[in-house]
Amino acid sequence: MLREYYLEVLYTAPALHSQQKFKWQIYSTDVAQAWMKLLITQLKLNTHFSCNYTGFKFFNNKKILTQSLNNCIKLINESKIYPINEIMPLKYSQKILNVIHDHFEAIYQVRKSSFSPKLLMAIEGLNYFVHALEDHYKIQADGENLAFTRHKFNGNMLFPFQEKFYEQFKLDLNFGEVYLHYHQIGKSCLSHFLDQILVTTPSNVIPQNLLNAGFDVCWGEHSFSLHEKKLLQNYLINQNQDPENKKLCLGYLPLAKLVSHQHLDKKEIINLMSLHTIVEKIDVCTEYCMISSKTFHQENIKDLLIREFSI
């Protein structure tokens, strides 16, 4: 019988003097086991960690998100490292957000450690506020609350996929499930489809093909209908892509299933997560022993970026 391994994350709400420990059972799949081993190693290193909350309704002020994005653009332009001619209007424009995200990808390639901390934050803010505005629009448009907590290690160890990993992508998202973090600059084919971006610069389409220790938790669920699958197929064909090509990495790589908080309904769990926005500790363990553990002292990136750029 295979030994069962678990991921545990302790989230805190300092203002409420409250903590919530969530627990997931790690799958026995090849990719999940390889990710777990990498996470165990990563937790032993002294690398910067951040957790980004997206899609939650706790911060839904379009004006502040737009102003913050434009302030990031202003600071980058003032630094003269890269020109950005666009500004984001209050009226939602996916086209402008796509262009700004393209700028982020370009700037990220030329960033230097010698840049001031605030300039580095502004570069990070381009990416964060673009996705925050996209989330805001999707919630307003259809009420779908497809929220994520994205746990990312900077200075991450990255390794090319093993061939068998390409067979393990899934299109559907399940509530509370853990997925491999997309730790690459660009957008996957599926992200391009969901954002309905016309791919004119193929270099920006980057399939997820690097194993890393980062992980995302989906606090919602979505199943692709037959109609959506057909739309995706047609979209790929129009982009001269083979829908059957596993190297396109369409979907997400499941790593673990939620096994704690089963007594609560989904709305109650989402509410808990929206209150507990600081990751204090990450553990990998079995039922009987701790394998790897790390305590963090970090601020939620949302709070940090908004405080710096919303004024």
Image (cartoon, rainbow, N blue to C red):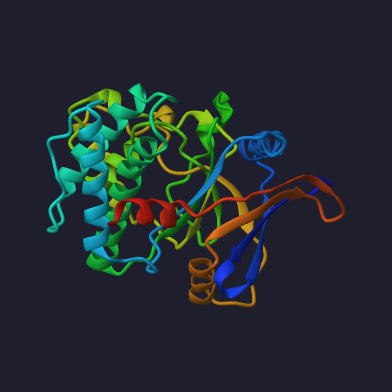
Residue 225 position, x and y percent, is 34, 56
Given residues 75 and 180, the one toward you in this image is 75
- Look at the picture and state if 264 lies above or below 297: below
Residue 93 position, x and y percent, is 14, 51
Q: With 239 as the anchor, is 124 left or right in this view?
A: right
Q: With 85 as the anchor, is 107 left or right in this view?
A: right
Please tell me which residue is depicted at 49% across the width and 55% down the height of the picture. Answer: 300
Please tell me which residue is depicted at 32% across the width and 36% down the height of the picture. Answer: 189
Residue 205 in view in this figure: no
Given residues 245 and 128, the one toward you in this image is 128
- Look at the picture and state if 159 lies above or below 233: above
Q: Which residue, as the protein is rendered here, is positioned at the far right?
A: 288
Please tell me which residue is depicted at 47% across the width and 44% down the height of the picture. Answer: 252
Residue 124 position by quadrant: top left
Residue 288 position, x and y percent, is 87, 54
Please tell me which residue is depicted at 56% across the width and 33% down the height of the picture. Answer: 212
